Image (tube, rainbow, N blue to C red):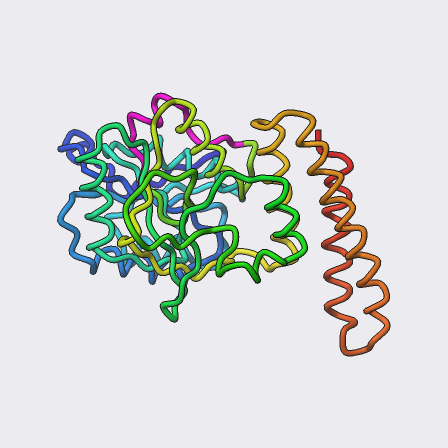
Amino acid sequence: MLEMLQKSADSEGIQGPVPDMSIVLVCWNNRQYLDSCLGSLYAAGLRCSFDVVVVDNGSSDGSQEMLRAKYPGVQQIQNDGNVGLGKASNQGIEATRGRYVLLLNNDTLVNAASLDAMVEFLETHPKAGAVGGRLINPDGSFQAGCADFSTLKEEFLVAIRLGELLWDGYPSHMDGGSVRPVAWLSSACLLLRRSALDKVGLLDEEYFIYGDEADLQYRLHKAGLPVYYLPSATTVHYGGRSMDRWRRRKMVYRGKMLFYRKNYGPVKTGILRVMLGGLSLTKALIWIFSGILPRRKDRARKELRSNLEVLALCCRLK
């Protein structure tokens, strides 16, 4: 059962002016980062009007209480459990009215110059479906920029970690020069035109997490609604705060295979599954032997379980 806790949805507010931007955050046991994110948002001094909705996926760390105490103007949607990022994001989008929708990770820090620039870009480029910028690490270093849609070669280089030697953030490109249309951008901070969402639909809820933003932007491109990269717009992104790397690996690969199945057809999907399954089996065998060393035993156990989970996923996903 979905319990709706609306902290700013009084009847007068609902009938008020439509905000320029509705900001949607999904939270799952990330109170500290959510607090910092909202603090940066309200302290930024945005020129554009905005409202905020936080969809909580059954947090047990006091996130709901913190929201009520510190951010009473935030609309809160409370789920009984973790329904996934895609579904929760859709709940937030459907509960808001802004002309533009900002998908924002809760482990980010934002600034007014970047968010206002993104809104202004969509205002002056009516054919654009979405816009985003560069993600940077807390130390100011590059984390991720724009990316091409996945290829089998790219996935191989990612899986064997050779891509990391090619450039920082592989397969993302920094492309710090001019504004330009790109394939897709991370939904850690992605501004979407609501009318574009009305045309192509919301996030596909079959993706629990990972892959949903690429799938949505693939549909935008097919509908003739390009996605633009605004390199001057920056967002600090901590990243990976909801789950550890071993649990995340399975979800990442599940998202990749769903994207291929939906958009690339059975042949490429089959090749991807065989490739990732074979690499996972090889890695599992390596970690079996590595576990003999006492100092590597704990990590070997986690790596073995993680790679076997990916292997099982490759064998059964339809």
Inspect the magenta stretch and tell me whether residue 193 lies in it: yes
Which of the two residues, 62 or 55, is positioned nearer the viewer here?
55
Q: Which residues are magenta?
A: 192-205
Instruction: Answer left or right for 245 relative to 172.
Output: right
Which of the two residues, 153 or 212, is positioned nearer the viewer here?
153
The residue drawn where x is 81% and y is 77% is: 294
Which of the two residues, 174 or 18, is positioned nearer the viewer here?
174
* Residue 114 visible to an observer of this rendering: yes
Instruction: Answer left or right for 144 relative to 301.
Output: left
Q: Position of residue 77 (x, y in %)?
A: 38, 41
The residue drawn where x is 39% and y is 22% is: 223
Residue 94 sits above or below residue 70 on the image = above
Q: Position of residue 126 (x, y in %)?
A: 22, 29
The quarter of the displayed image where residue 6 is located: top left
* Residue 83 visible to an observer of this rendering: no
Q: Quick one: quadrant of the C terminus?
A: top right
Q: Position of residue 186 (x, y in %)?
A: 43, 46
Instruction: Answer left or right for 139 relative to 304.
Output: left
